[in-house]
Image (tube, rainbow, N blue to C red):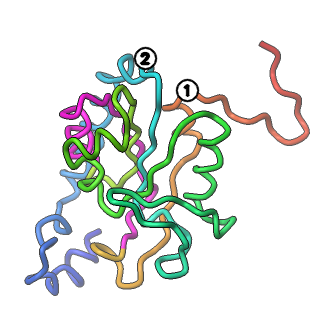
Amino acid sequence: MERFLAEEHPSYSWREDVVFAARPRVEYHLNMVGAELMNRAQRAAFLQTPRKAVIVPACLRYHPRPRCRAVSGPLACECRGCEPRCRVRQLTRLGAEQGFDVFLVPHESSVFAGEAGRQLLGDGAGIVGVTCVPNLLAGGWKALRLGLPPQCVLLDHCGCRKHWHDEGISTEIDEAELRRVLAIEEPPEAGRPAPIR
């Protein structure tokens, strides 16, 4: 982070994300603590929702456009499963198996665009926002304003081309954490029988 701020950030002077990309380490830590507090405060309401929606960022795709074949909609993109290694494809398939929707969004602000966002996500949905640390709390508060109880899951690292890297780096999440948040059981380990409940 310090290398980016010292070497790369000075060239951001005339970019719209000059402030966003210069967040100091303490703000990252405060956002992580705030996200955990929001998760705990909204946990019961989230678990009671009849539907779950997972919002994932474009940087989670394995291939950037145009190689990514996701079809753009008004607020989100629909994954077409073009690349088996793509995390969005894997999560979309997990969602189909486990009963939650996955929305690939170019920017979290688009999916929370008032009534259109509520219609896309559905009334009464519990929202899991998967994002980098600087966007965590803002997305959670926007979901709450729409009456959609949020949970936050951090990306393992930032990698979007718009803010952090010239070519973009495919990001990753901790699937075990996503499963925990969604209250989905872990799959049994290969060769071991599923636990009897």
The quarter holding residue 153 reads: top left
Look at the picture and state if 101 lies above or below 82.
above
Observer-nearest of 53 and 194: 53
Observer-nearest of 80 and 16: 80
Residue on which the image places disc 1: 183
Q: Position of residue 39 (x, y in %)?
A: 34, 30
Q: Residue at left 14%, top 83%?
A: 10
Q: Residue furthest top?
A: 197
Q: Quadrant of the C terminus?
A: top right
Q: Amino acid at mark 1?
A: Ala
Disc 2 crowd rating (10 Å Cα; few below 14, some 14-19, many 20+) is few
Q: Position of residue 99 (x, y in %)?
A: 59, 34
Residue 48, label in figure = 2
Q: Amino acid at mark 2?
A: Gln
- 148 inside magenta stretch: yes
Cα distance in 3D space between marks 2 and 1: 11 Å
Observer-nearest of 36 and 146: 146
Look at the picture and state if 86 lies above or below 121.
below
Q: Position of residue 5 (x, y in %)?
A: 21, 74
The quarter holding residue 24 reads: bottom left
Residue 32, label in figure = none
Give the magenta-colored segment's residue range: 136-160
- Mark in the foreground, 2 or 1: 2
Q: Residue at left 88%, top 29%?
A: 193
Q: Secondary structure at mark 2?
A: helix
Q: Quadrant of the N terminus?
A: bottom left
Q: Secondary structure at mark 1?
A: loop
Left or right relative to 90: residue 39: left
